[in-house]
Image: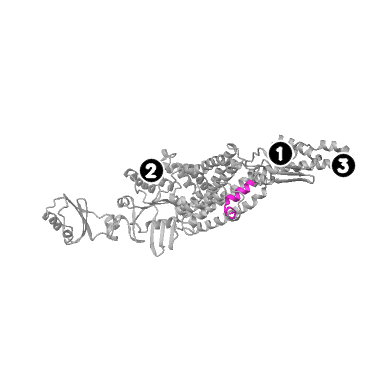
Amino acid sequence: MNIFNIALIEFKHTIRDVRTLVFMLAFPIVMMLILGTALSTTFDKNIKIGKINVLYTEKTDISFSSPFHGFIKEAKKQDIHFKKAPHGLDGKKAVKQNHYDAYVVVTDKGVQFYGSERNSIQASIAEGMLSAFTDKYNLITEVAKEKPDQVQTVMASVSTTPGSYVKETSLNADKAPGSMDYYAVAMTTMIALYSAISASNLIRGERIRNTAVRLVIAPINKMEIFLGKILGSLALNLVCIMLVMAFSRFVFGADWGVHPGMVLLILFTEVFLAVSFGLGISYIIKADQGTRTILMIILQLSSFFGGAYFRIENADGILRFIMNLSPLTWAREALTKIIYNNDLTAALPVISLNLGISLLFLLFAVVAFRRREGL
Amino acid sequence: MNVLEIKNLTKKFGDFIAVDNMSLAVQEGEIFGFLGSNGAGKSTTINMIAGLLQTNGGEIKILDKNIASHSKLAKMNIGIVPQDLAIYEDMTAYENVRFFAGLYGLRGAELKERVEEALVFVGLLDKQKSLPKDFSGGMKRRLNIACAIAHRPKLIIMDEPTVGIDPQSRNYILTSVRKLNEMGCTVIYTSHYMEEVEEICSRIAIMDHGKVIAEGTKEQLKAIITDTRDIWVEVKNTENLEEAALKEIKGVNSISIEENVIKINSQSEVNNLNHIIQFFISRLIEIRSLQEQAPNLETVFLTLTGRNLRD
């Protein structure tokens, strides 16, 4: 009961501290809004292709030329423009100089394709359509040789319009985070980490207010005080995080996936880690201002390298190593996998890591707390 | 019956001995005064009684129970009013008293009753929903007391409860101490204000350098002072006053000057009053009044320690 009463009073303290509450609630929401809006283009999943220009040279007989020209005609409807190379023009050089997206050489032996490295998407589309066309041509030619009466059936079964030459298939094509989705996760995990600051003041605050005296002289166990304070801090920070999540979900439309329980469990263990870390640091560094400064430096670096402010893509080497040191990276990447790939197995490593490190810091804090006279 | 009994109590901070083999007993129903200058060991002693500090030796008993082995029982019977305010500024007066009283196992209707009783006692019931940050210094001090008494302790320890407050609040608190005592509480009271201790305490211990150097009723303590007396001379001006010459008068131990009052401490057995008066007349210093002060605790303290209490 004493633990609950102490937890409740801790909860009330923080909830009545406007500055802390603004920091825990308004700050992540405002950051989400600013960064999610300002950097929305870097998360855009649509790429505008525009007109694709293909240069070609034809060295073939009439049997392939006719269907190839039919293909060119249909391709134009899809904004893929084939232009016959003027005599003497080096097609490959023209592509290298970025005058065309691809160069095609049609001979009796087959079709040779040279794509632009600069405009790789345009070149890939042209290549895909061209290879689909040649596959179909080869198929119909073979059928015509073996069973001419079946040609019409085969031709009917395969569409010859260029729009159907390439069918895009993507795994979870629509499940990738937009900017607001990304920053909803990033800011929530960041603010969970910032629980360390209030936690560093849990016991110290009682000493500063001198109320530690009343707690110590009361007929209760010191560990009840310790556990009550931690419980209150955990509860308050978890409520703040749930409010931020709810706001991002219902106001910004952020996607939190279909496993809210698992998402909350990961965030809870992250808060637990932050609270234990803050408490542990407050016993390692005795000076008030020193604790806060060190914590702020660690938290800011964790936030930065954890991708709270900017998404860091394709990081490797030393950068990846530094990123992996940030608890924000662990939590954010696990949450992304759970939300967008339904990969619940991603939760286990991060939960284990969070709880393991939390217990280490907590153990240190408990030993220091018990050895200390008073609180 | 002894409510508090201390035997050979010692506390060291490194090489510094804050409390040195101290022994005393406080009996039930007393208002026991602790006198001592800063660093005398009063607060350290109180902190050890309250369990805030570990002892380096000796024994403390509350209601005949050793606090080392009966810590919880001892704590249930103690209420502390710390020198520095120990209240939550962001909690209402009611919430403050309720929370701290709740730590003593009080619940439900009993808790509510005790909280209201404590708030009535300190005259803050009408302010129960207000935050202490909106209170005056005196009101905060009263709330500080309410938080210490809601669980009805048998022993209340008050450490400088009147520091920095207005005379009205001070009177209120002194009256409250007497009322608590009448209700059956034993009170240990420490203060820098000698007149407060003299006014309300039934027995007094004077501490210096971690030791109790004198203990007894105020009459018993004053009786210690038999060899000196204080003569206060109020003069029109002190321009022609030669302090060195005044000190040379036979029997004068020391002098101090506060505005136009010259305070002379002199040996009792030397009859030098005529010489002192002659000193002022010969220098054309007009005497407005002259009185011999009865010994008080300040004089006792000065005599025993060689220092003023507030040094």
Displayed quadrant of residue B294 = bottom left
Please state the horizontal and vertical placement of residue A1, each as a whole percent of the image.
54, 48
Callout 3 amino acid: Lys
Name the secondary structure under disc 1: strand
Residue at 43% in and 47% down: B87
Residue B131 higher or lower than B33, as above or below: above
Whether A326 is among the magenta residues is yes
**Other residues around mark 3 within 10 Å, as few (<14) / some (14–19) / many (≥20):** few
Judge by depth and name the residue closer to the eye, A293 or A130: A130
Q: Circle 2 is placed at which residue position? A: B139
Judge by depth and name the residue closer to the eye, A237 or A306: A306
Residue at 60% in and 37% down: A253
Callout 1 amino acid: Phe
Q: Circle 3 is placed at which residue position? A: A145
Quick one: quadrant of the C terminus of chain B? Answer: bottom left
Q: Chain of mark 2?
A: B
